[in-house]
């Protein structure tokens, strides 16, 4: 008589972490996402057994990660500016360096006279990360957000509904489907700040393969071009119509594009042009004030 095969025992937390084939941090994030156990709890109880249903779900998500899918799409969320945003493959994954764009916009909004009604427009809002972060940080600011993708706006509206108090003094975020400014008209108010993290990846950039899971529209735009600046040119040329007289245009761009963006702003008469560096020391955001007020120095600067 052949003895029955032993029933496989479910793995412990430590065993699954050791055998899942993922970097430890990614594996711990998946465990937290599926089981609700944070890293401290995982470290405190490595001997805890996982049930079969949890293991099956973990293994399925781990396989997606091993196939190259970004962690944010696998878990459906990404932290940005201290807030947890839902993300899908319809939107670009928010990056930490884009938090600089939020910081710089808040600085300029804070400098407005106290009697002003501050307004900000987020062009190409994607997940709504920038618009929502500003609305949450400055409840008095009126925030508008547009995107050419209706699918992206669906994600952005969902994030705003979860994270922004609709009763805030500045009101709910105004969302609209728009190819940059094309969907806005003369009834749209002028803005103190227009911000954008637009497509800026060149059409033959070797990094595109590593970004293949993210929407091409958000990376290279509707009309990919050799230097990646096609959409930035459109924004720079059209923004003055929608800016307050001394309003600011702030643009995120690639690591090697700051000088070109400064030149574009100069050519269109912007003043106070400045490029700001992210925490890695890279010129990441360039801003210009439009129109150029009297007395502004013509030379740009880097901070």
Image (cartoon, helix red, strand yellow):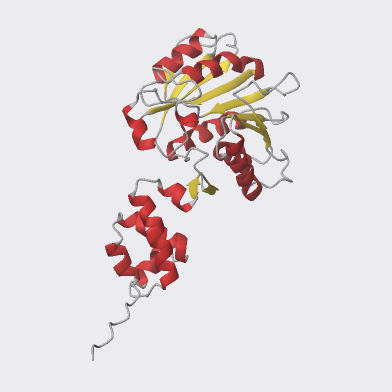
Q: Is residue 119 left or right of residue 266?
A: right
Residue 5 versus residue 195: which sits nearer the camera?
5
Q: Residue furthest right?
A: 187
When the figure is inspected, residue 101 is found, relative to residue 275, above or below; the finding is: below
**x 61%, y 26%: residue:** 193
Which residue of the protein is positioned furthest toward the bottom in this rendering?
Answer: 1
Residue at 33% over, 75% down: 47
Task: Tally the marks.
Answer: 0
> Which residue of the protein is positioned furthest toward the front in this rendering?
1
Horizontally, is 71 left or right of 77 in the view?
left
Quarter of the N terminus within the rendering? bottom left
Which of the 4 quarters of the picture holds residue 38? bottom left
Q: Quadrant of the C terminus?
A: top left
Q: Residue at x 39, y 46 (%)?
A: 69
- Asked if residue 83 shows in the view, the reply is yes
Residue 159 is situated, as x and y percent measured from the top left of the image, at 60, 46
> Vertically, is 210 above or below 31?
above
Q: Position of residue 6 (x, y in %)?
A: 29, 82
Q: Is residue 31 visible?
A: no
Relative side of 198 to 278, left or right: right
Q: Position of residue 133 (x, y in %)?
A: 57, 41
């Amino acid at each position: 008589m052949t003895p029955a095969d032993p029933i496989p025992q479910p793995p412990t937390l430590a065993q699954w972490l050791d055998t899942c084939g993922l970097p430890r941090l990614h594996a711990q994030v998946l465990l937290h996402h599926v089981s609700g156990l944070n890293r401290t709890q995982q470290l405190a109880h490595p001997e805890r057994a996982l049930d079969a249903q949890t293991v099956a779900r973990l293994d399925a998500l781990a396989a997606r990660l091993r196939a190259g899918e970004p962690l944010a799409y696998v878990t459906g969320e990404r932290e940005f500016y201290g807030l947890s945003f839902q993300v899908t493959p319809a939107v670009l994954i928010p990056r930490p360096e884009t938090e600089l764009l939020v910081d710089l916009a808040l600085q300029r909004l804070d400098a407005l006279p106290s009697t002003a009604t501050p307004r900000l427009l987020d062009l190409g809002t994607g997940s709504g990360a920038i618009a929502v972060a500003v609305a949450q940080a400055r409840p008095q600011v009126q925030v508008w957000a547009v995107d050419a993708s209706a699918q992206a706006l669906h994600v952005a509206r969902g994030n705003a509904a979860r994270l922004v108090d609709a009763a805030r003094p500045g009101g709910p975020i105004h969302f609209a489907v728009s190819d940059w400014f094309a969907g806005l008209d003369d009834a749209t108010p002028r803005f103190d700040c227009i911000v954008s993290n637009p497509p800026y990846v060149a059409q033959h950039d070797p990094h595109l393969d590593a970004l293949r899971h993210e929407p091409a529209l958000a990376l290279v735009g509707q009309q990919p071009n050799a230097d990646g600046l096609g959409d930035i040119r459109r924004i720079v040329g059209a923004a003055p119509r929608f800016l307050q007289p001394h309003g600011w245009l702030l643009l995120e761009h690639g690591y090697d594009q700051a000088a070109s963006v400064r030149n574009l702003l100069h050519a269109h008469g912007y003043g106070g042009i400045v490029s700001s560096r992210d925490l890695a020391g890279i010129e990441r955001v360039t801003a210009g004030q439009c129109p150029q007020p009297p007395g502004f120095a013509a030379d740009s600067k880097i901070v």
